Image: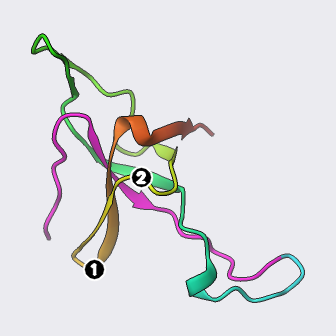
């Protein structure tokens, strides 16, 4: 099984897909009309943000965090049949706390 090791301030996120394919009134939504997911689970993080002075600042997110990210942020990849998104920590809007 292949894995992605993000560099610096990049994060690998596995999108959380919507479970329900219909509206509350019962209208079925086809896959082509669904919104792109904006929630996901962090599965890998880089070593931190590189500053101009050469120091590395650790990231705020960690593996296992559930996050909300900008809808059109990052780059999508398929690794071993699994859809993943690589984005910068700046594209993450919030950590979902339970």
Mark 2 vs mark 1: in front: 2
In depth, the one of 35 and 17 nearer the eye is 35
Give the prevailing secondary structure in the magenta stretch: loop
Q: Residue at x 69, y 77 (%)?
A: 20
Residue 62 in view here:
no
In depth, the one of 79 and 9 nearer the eye is 9
Q: Is residue 9 magenta?
A: yes
Q: Residue at x 31, y 73 (%)?
A: 82
Numbered-mark total: 2
69 left or right, relative to 43: right
Q: CA distance from mark 2 to mark 1?
A: 21 Å
Q: Residue at x 44, y 52 (%)?
A: 41
- The label shown at residue 81 is 1
Q: Is residue 85 magenta?
A: no
In depth, the one of 16 and 71 nearer the eye is 71
34 left or right, relative to 27: left
Q: What segment is highlighted magenta in the picture?
A: 1-23
Circle 2 is placed at which residue position?
A: 73
Quarter holding residue 47: top left
Q: In x, y percent, where is residue 19?
A: 63, 74
**In the image as oriented, which residue stretches furthest toward the top?**
53
For label 1, the SS is loop
95 left or right, relative to 89: right
Say above or below: 69 vs 81: above
Which corner quadrant holds the N terminus? bottom left
For label 2, the SS is loop
Q: Residue at x 36, y 37 (%)?
A: 89
Residue 83 in view here:
yes
26 left or right, relative to 34: right
Q: In x, y percent, where is residue 67?
A: 50, 45
């Amino acid at each position: 099984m292949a894995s992605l090791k993000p560099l610096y301030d990049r994060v690998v996120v596995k999108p959380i897909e919507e479970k329900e394919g219909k509206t509350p009134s019962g209208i079925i939504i086809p896959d082509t009309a669904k919104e792109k997911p904006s929630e996901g689970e962090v599965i890998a993080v880089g070593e931190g943000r590189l500053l101009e002075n050469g120091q590395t600042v650790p990231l705020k997110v960690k593996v296992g965090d559930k996050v909300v990210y900008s809808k059109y942020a990052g780059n999508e990849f398929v690794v071993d049949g699994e859809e993943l998104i690589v984005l910068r920590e700046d594209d993450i809007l919030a950590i979902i706390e339970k």
